[in-house]
Image (cartoon, coloured by chain):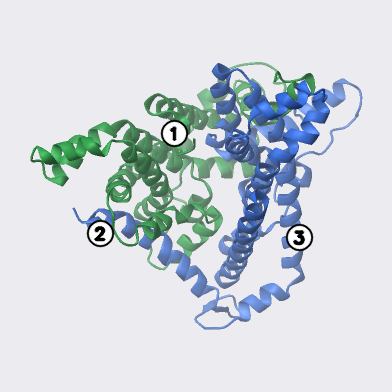
Chain colours: A green, B blue
Amino acid sequence: MRPGWALRLLAFCGYALLLAPVIVVALISFSAGDFLTFPPPGFSTRWYEALFANGQLMAALQRSAILASVVAVIALLAGLPAAYAIARLRFPGRDAIAMLIAAPLLLPTLVLGLALLLALQPLKLAATWPGLVLAHSMVALPFAVRIMTTAFGAVPREVEEAAWTLGATPMRAALRITLPIAAPGAAAAGALCFLVSFDETVISLFLVGPRLSTLPVEMFRYVETRTDPLVAALAMALIGVALAVVLLVERLVGFNRALGRS
Amino acid sequence: MSAALLLLPAVLILAAGFLYPVALLGRISLNRTSDIGAMEPDLTLATFEKVVGDDFTWELAWNTATLAAGSALAATALALPVVLLIRAAPPRWRGLLSLMAIAPLLVSGTARIVGWLAILGDQGLINAMLEGLGLTSEPVRLINNWTGVRIGLTESLMPYACLVLIAGLGRLDPRLEEAAATLGATRTKTFLRVTLPLAAPALLAAFLLTFVLGVSAFITPRLMGGGRVFVVATEIFDLALETVDWPAAAALAMLLLGALAVALVLRTALMRSARA
């Protein structure tokens, strides 16, 4: 049935609400004004210049990129074998393990952040690299395992069995046959884990210190205290990274499939 | 290959980064805070009694529940036409329309707040429009208060509502609506008598999911509220990092988890009866 005008109008309002903030951020990041005035009094690239000249934010950007890369590698190294076991092997407690790995997603990040602060502070690991890497790996891991379980599940069992028949050990068959076929899924998983860590704000707020802060935390603090278009330019940088990752995942495996939906 | 060996790295990360911290959170909620504000090891429900006996906690709980319920309702209601449009669109448009509906999920929450500040602020888009039309002479306050938090939270919950509705309504047979139209029902009547009843379980699922997410939202209440809006999440954050009263923060977090667990059980029961 063709949609009627009432549906079209309401759906337009829905999309307007969904997309308005992102569109406005994009426009205002090119503002020539001193405040978050909309419509902007003029257009310029002065806030991007200010962003690149801001040592504190650039250092945080670099730190976040390094952190997210390390987290993506760790989440993949730990997630790939776990996903293979869940997708391919029969063992007692398989469902319980799968549930445990998904469990961090059920808890509010605020509670996870608080719990990690209480656990890491007495160990002198709060506001340290190992502490942040552990926290981010924990939230990224469920995504890695979920995507890779789907990816391994999509590799026909017969291919692996053929390798066994031809004399390959199960280990060799998994590494030389199954893993290369599932490689696009692994790349997508790595990209999403990178994004999960790169955008993670709430848990980081509990765990950062004056000398070790991430880009989302710096942006959060900036919005709390000041409102000038610099923060819009910063937001665009984050959106740009997110967009790059989404396009990469879409090209590799298709976005909906990567999330395990439909 | 042994499954245990393959699972070991993942389980170690979860044990150190999830199970131990959450267990410790529960343990610390049973400690007490001394009069000078230091944490004393104990095994008492005193902190829970203090938190539950405080009227402010109940005010926070009411604020949180009404905020989450209102925003979840608005998000679900606004997501419905979006998803109905996606469903009715030609197949080649569906992918793009779905991506547009859930893309905000991947944009950092703080970045979207910056957009809302520029739309709703005193010098923002809405106030510029109102003034241009001559409707107001001075800016209408739309941020740093509950209005701003409600709008921001509704928008941040909408992609989740869209996801649930896309999955739920995708299974509905469009021929049922076509049949109603063929039999002479108007669009409104078809919507009210056919589409809406069929969509009810998916709508309920979308509302319940967004409600649960809204209850624990932190970034939007904090930034859109400008420090003037208090909900359970902002209070836990302040207790942990500003007052540094760990037992109280832990106790409030445990109460939040308990409330979410109850909501989850209710959700499962409701979903089961909605399907039956």
Residue at the disc numbered 2: B4
* Mark identifier at residue B62: 3
Most distant residue in the front direction: B183
Q: CA distance from mark 1 to mark 3?
A: 39 Å
**Residue flagged by tag 1: what amino acid is it?**
Arg
Q: CA distance from mark 3 to mark 2?
A: 46 Å
Residue at the disc numbered 1: A257
Most distant residue in the bottom direction: B43
Residue A1 percent across, percent down from the top left? 70, 20
The answer to whether B266 is drawn above or below residue B155 in the figure is below
In the image, is B187 to the left or to the right of A262?
A: right
Q: Secondary structure at mark 2?
A: helix
In the image, is A161 to the left or to the right of A227?
A: left
Q: Secondary structure at mark 3?
A: helix
Decide: marks 3, 2 in contact (CB < 8 A)?
A: no
**Residue flagged by tag 3: what amino acid is it?**
Trp
In the image, is A55 to the left or to the right of B109?
A: left
The answer to whether B244 is drawn above or below residue A42 in the figure is below
Q: Mark 1, residues whose alpha carbon is within 10 Å: few (<14), some, or many (≥20)?
A: some
Residue B17 percent across, percent down from the top left? 40, 59
Quarter where residue A4 is shown: top right
